[in-house]
Image (cartoon, rainbow, N blue to C red):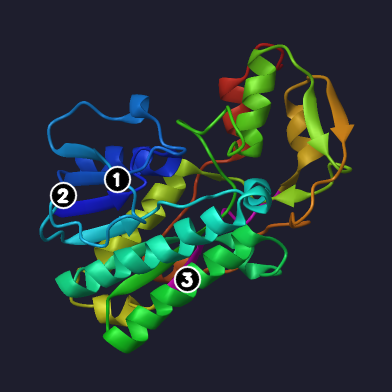
């Protein structure tokens, strides 16, 4: 199968491409390397990487004429930077999504879209959440109006290999990893009682692949247009995560626009796709950050 992955040099994209290659597929990655990294590129037959700004073109024929599947992961994927750069956030998460969908429509190519669990909260809490919600609406529009086969996968607080540990687009676990390795006290915003449904990137990738595969089966039409919540269904407070490290931490001012809690209670992915997230963040921390852990 020929697969196009946008954001393929990023955190989730890198792990997805590894899985696709292991499954025997040919992959092309399009990434502008805003948060993606050159060092994430996999030097292996069957994958090509292109430095492409999805805002600058809506014609990707040069890179892959007729893919069998598109995974659209490219996005500005954090809340706080979206306050500083709302225009770029909306262009990246909405206009670029429109470009990808329009090209996919011309190729009659199914699209799996990376949504966000923040879409379940207040869509007007921050530019990021609204932009991702509008991206989802575009996907739904192309599915209903143009009969483009699509699924939406909403991610919950992803962590794991290739997560960012530097810069403004870090995840919480990525920030803690950097501070831990550099002998710095953890910084916890607000009271630390915010709860997050941490989901390992390998489980996220498994959900993405299941969503893509099902669209290509004879039953694909039954699943086209569906939104799947990819969360483990168990959450922890930031304080609980910090204490697992047995490491000093300090509190800073609460940041605007953040959800108080994320928790996946929707079982559709499990029921319809057979998706079974097996990994727990507690085990990940104990395995990977053992310097002071019992």
Q: Which residue is mark 2?
A: 63
Residue at x-position 11% and y-position 61%: 66
Q: Quadrant of residue 165?
A: top right
Q: Quadrant of residue 56?
A: bottom left
Q: Is residue 274 visible?
A: no
Decide: few, some or many residues near mark 3? Use Cα within 10 Å; few <14, some 14-19, many ≥20: many
Residue at x-position 78% and y-position 37%: 240
Decide: few, some or many residues near mark 2? Use Cα within 10 Å; few <14, some 14-19, many ≥20: some
Q: Quadrant of residue 212?
A: bottom left
Residue 234 belongs to the span the image colors magenta:
yes
Q: Which residue is mark 1?
A: 52
**Is 75 on the left-hand or right-hand side of 180?**
left
Q: Quadrant of the C terminus?
A: top right
- Image: magenta residue range: 227-235
Q: Label 1, secondary structure: give it.
A: loop
Q: Is residue 95 visible?
A: yes
When the figure is inspected, residue 108 is found, relative to residue 288, above or below; the finding is: below
Q: Quadrant of the N terminus?
A: bottom left
Residue 108 belongs to the span the image colors magenta:
no
* Count of numbered labels shown in the rendering: 3
**Is 76 on the left-hand or right-hand side of 17?**
right
Residue 276 at x, y percent in the picture: 46, 54
Residue 144 at x, y percent in the picture: 35, 86
Q: Earlier in the sequence, mark 3 or mark 2?
A: 2
Rounded to the nearest angstrom, the CA distance separating label 3 from label 2 is 25 Å
**Is 100 on the left-hand or right-hand side of 27?**
right
When the figure is inspected, residue 69 is found, relative to residue 50, above or below; the finding is: below
**Is 11 on the left-hand or right-hand side of 116?**
left
């Amino acid at each position: 199968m020929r697969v196009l992955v946008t954001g393929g040099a990023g955190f989730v994209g890198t792990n997805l491409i590894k899985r696709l290659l292991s499954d025997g597929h040919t992959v092309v990655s399009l990434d502008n390397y805003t948060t993606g990294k050159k060092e994430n590129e996999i030097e292996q037959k069957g994958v090509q990487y292109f430095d492409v700004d999805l805002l600058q073109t809506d014609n990707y024929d040069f890179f892959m004429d007729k893919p069998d599947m598109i995974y659209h992961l490219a996005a500005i994927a954090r809340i706080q930077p979206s306050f500083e750069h709302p225009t770029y956030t909306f262009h990246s998460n909405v206009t670029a999504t429109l470009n990808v969908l329009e090209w996919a429509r011309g190729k009659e190519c199914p699209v799996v879209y990376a949504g966000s669990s923040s879409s379940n909260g207040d869509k007007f809490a921050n530019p990021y959440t609204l932009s991702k919600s509008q991206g989802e609406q575009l996907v739904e529009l192309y599915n209903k109006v143009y009969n483009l086969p699509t699924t939406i996968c909403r991610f919950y607080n992803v962590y794991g290999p290739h997560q960012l540990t530097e810069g403004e687009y870090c995840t919480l676990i990525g920030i803690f990893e950097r501070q831990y390795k550099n002998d710095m006290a953890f910084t916890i915003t607000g009271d630390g009682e915010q709860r997050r449904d941490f989901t390992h990137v390998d489980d996220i990738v498994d959900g993405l692949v299941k969503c893509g595969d099902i669209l290509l089966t004879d039953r694909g039409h039954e699943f086209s247009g569906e939104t799947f919540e990819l969360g483990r269904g168990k959450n922890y407070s930031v304080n609980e995560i910090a204490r697992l490290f047995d490491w000093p931490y300090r509190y800073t001012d609460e940041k605007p626009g953040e959800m108080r809690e994320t928790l996946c209670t929707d079982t559709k992915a499990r029921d319809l796709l057979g998706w079974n997230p097996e990994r727990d963040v507690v085990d990940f921390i104990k395995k990977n950050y053992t310097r002071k852990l019992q």
